[in-house]
Amino acid sequence: MVYEKVCLTGRRWLLAASTASAGLLMATAPWAAWAQTGLDATATQSSSEQGVTIKVTAKSIGLPGHQWEFAVVLDTHSADLSDDLSQSATLTTGDGRTFKPAGWRGAPPGGHHREGVLAFDVPAPQPGAIELRIDRPGESAPRTFRWQL
């Protein structure tokens, strides 16, 4: 009889734990899916031309009330990175609106390695797609980096 009570109590505990685990899984599933789409949106994009590589990662885009930020890394072994990114970068929305950066926080012009963050004021209404363009001196076309929101 004692064995039956212990066995029954163990089964109840197992059932309660299984139910709680299933509920937790169902409650967090939408967040996991959201996190996966967020990872795609913040994947690093890269462009290499004329010995200069530019890598851009969207750090915070689509968040209301916060500036949109893009981590930018420029690397070269042959040229001087004298770009003024606060002047040479633009953010263009899918509907054709263009914005200049609100600021650049990072390494000043010069050298062979630079990194920092380009910040933009949030475009309203929020677009479905954006494109960051960086015009470099001596290059015929801007470097482009695109995101779907």
Image (cartoon, grey):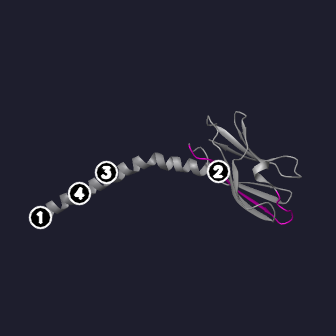
Residue bearing mark 2 = 69
Label 2 CA crowd tier, 10 Å (few <14, some 14–19, many 20+): many
Residue bearing mark 4 = 11
Numbered disc in front, either 4 or 3: 3
User: Mark 4 vs mark 3: which is more N-terminal?
Assistant: 4
Q: Which residues are magenta?
A: 65-82
* 45 sits to left or right of 37: right
Residue bearing mark 3 = 19
Numbered disc in front, either 3 or 1: 3
- Separation of disc 2 and disc 3 at Cα? 41 Å
User: Mark 3 vs mark 1: which is more N-terminal?
Assistant: 1
User: Mark 2 vs mark 4: which is more N-terminal?
Assistant: 4
Extreme residue toward the left, this view: 1
Q: Residue at x 56, y 44 (%)?
A: 65
User: Mark 1 vs mark 2: which is more N-terminal?
Assistant: 1
- Separation of disc 4 and disc 3 at Cα? 12 Å
Residue 48 location in percent, x, y? 80, 56
Q: Is residue 13 magenta?
A: no
- Separation of disc 2 and disc 4 at Cα? 52 Å
Inspect the image, locate mark 1, and give the three-letter code of the amino acid beneath it: Val
Q: Secondary structure at mark 3?
A: helix
Considering the image in quadrants, where does the N terminus appear? bottom left
Considering the image in quadrants, where does the C terminus appear? top right
Residue 36 location in percent, x, y? 55, 50
Numbered disc in front, either 2 or 3: 2
Inspect the image, locate mark 4, and give the three-letter code of the amino acid beneath it: Arg
Numbered disc in front, either 2 or 4: 2
Q: Residue at x 66, y 39 (%)?
A: 129
